[in-house]
Image (spheres, rainbow, N blue to C red):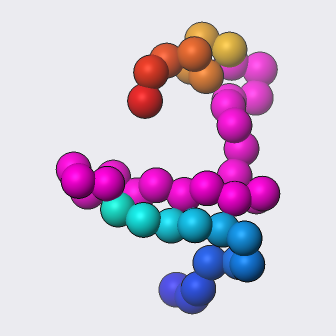
Amino acid sequence: MGLPLPGTAVRLDDDGEVLISGIGVFRGYHNNPEATAEPS
C-alpha cells in the first residue's frame, strides 16, 4: 500500500465504502451506459 497520487482524494463513507476522486478515476463504465446510469 502507499499514498494516493497528488490530486487524488480518498475517504471512507459512513457505511465503510471507500470513496475516491481524482484525475485517474473513471466517471462511468466503458460501453455500459446502463451500469453507469445506476444510482450509487
Q: Quadrant of residue 24?
A: bottom right
Magenta stretch encompasses residue 27: yes
* Along the viewing direction, whichever of 32 and 4 lies nearer the viewer: 4
Task: Say if 34 sits above or below 22 in the image.
Answer: above
Task: Say if 6 sits above or below 26 in the image.
Answer: below
Horizontal side of 20 relative to 25 (left or right) equals left
Residue 11 placed where, x, y %?
Answer: 42, 65
Residue 33 placed where, x, y %?
Answer: 68, 14
What residue lies at 52% left-to-right and 86% top-to-bottom? 1
State the residue lying farthest toward the bottom: 2
The quadrant of the picture occupied by the C terminus is top left
Residue 21 placed where, x, y %?
Answer: 61, 56
Which residue range is magenta in the image? 13-32
Horizontal side of 30 relative to 19 (left or right) equals right
Numbered marks: total: 0
Q: Quadrant of residue 9?
A: bottom right
State the residue lying farthest toward the top: 34
Horizontal side of 29 relative to 40 (left or right) equals right
Magenta stretch encompasses residue 17: yes
Horizontal side of 10 relative to 14 (left or right) equals right
Per the picture, the main secondary structure of the magenta-coloured stretch is loop
What residue lies at 35% left-to-right and 62% top-to-bottom? 12
What residue lies at 57% left-to-right and 16% top-to-bottom? 37
Q: Quadrant of residue 2?
A: bottom right
Residue 39 placed where, x, y %?
Answer: 44, 21
